Image: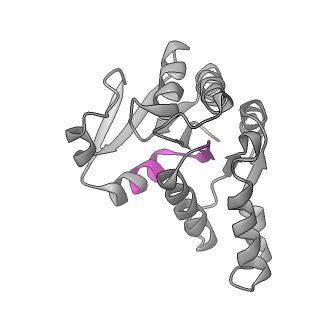
Amino acid sequence: MIQAVAVFCGSRNGNDPAFAEAARVLGKGLAEAGLTVVYGGGRAGIMGILADAAIAAGGRVEGVIPEFLLKWEVAHTGLGVLEVTDGMHSRKRRMFELADAFVALPGGIGTLDETMEILSWRQLKLHDKPILICDIGGCWAPLVAAIEATIQHGFASAEVRDFIEVLGSPEAVLARLSRPI
């Protein structure tokens, strides 16, 4: 049963207003569904938008942030829970431990890193938690193409395709999370 969802997303807004809107809709929807939002603990970009939308809708939001980012003063100070880790690796591990499913919203290199690590762990059979890619406006098409290329070139088995679900909207993500996994 899914009770907490880790959301990987950008610390910037990106260049399409649809990215911020997707974060708002997802944050609000997760809160309204009674699901805990687990995310990177930042206040900037669509990370902050996601958290603020979930908080405004009465949801539980748990941030996980590495200590060095506290020095950069990027932590969201309005969270019910803000867990501080000793680095990026322990942050990802802790988010994994807290979550029952993962969603990748649009984002940058950090979002790619988090998503690929969770996918790698799934391939290694370290978990069987759902990994949902929220492909707003085709932003993740290159990621999906890269995964396909690893399969086509014989570096990954075809079953890797089954480890992710690509959905085109936050509404589709919310609908998927409402079904048994």
Residue 23 in the figure: left or right of residue 147: left
Q: Is residue 59 above or below residue 36?
A: above
Q: Is residue 22 above or below residue 2?
A: above
Q: Which of 28 and 36 is in front in this view?
A: 28
Q: Nearer the viewer, residue 74 or 41?
A: 74
Residue 109 in the figure: left or right of residue 35: left
Q: Does the magenta stretch include residue 99?
A: yes
Q: Quadrant of residue 61?
A: top left
Q: What colouring method underlies this structural image? A: one colour
Residue appearing at x 57%, y 46% in the figure:
100
- What is the magenta range? 93-106
Q: Nearer the viewer, residue 41 or 98?
A: 41
Q: Quadrant of residue 69?
A: top left
Q: In this view, does 167 lie above or below 141?
A: above
Q: How many labels does the image show?
A: 0
Q: Is residue 40 magenta?
A: no
Residue appearing at x 51%, y 41% in the figure:
10
Q: Looking at the picture, how far across and down is residue 45, in whole percent?
A: 48, 32
Residue appearing at x 31%, y 24% in the figure:
77
Residue placed furthest toward the bottom? 154
Q: Looking at the picture, how far across and down is residue 173, in whole percent?
A: 73, 37
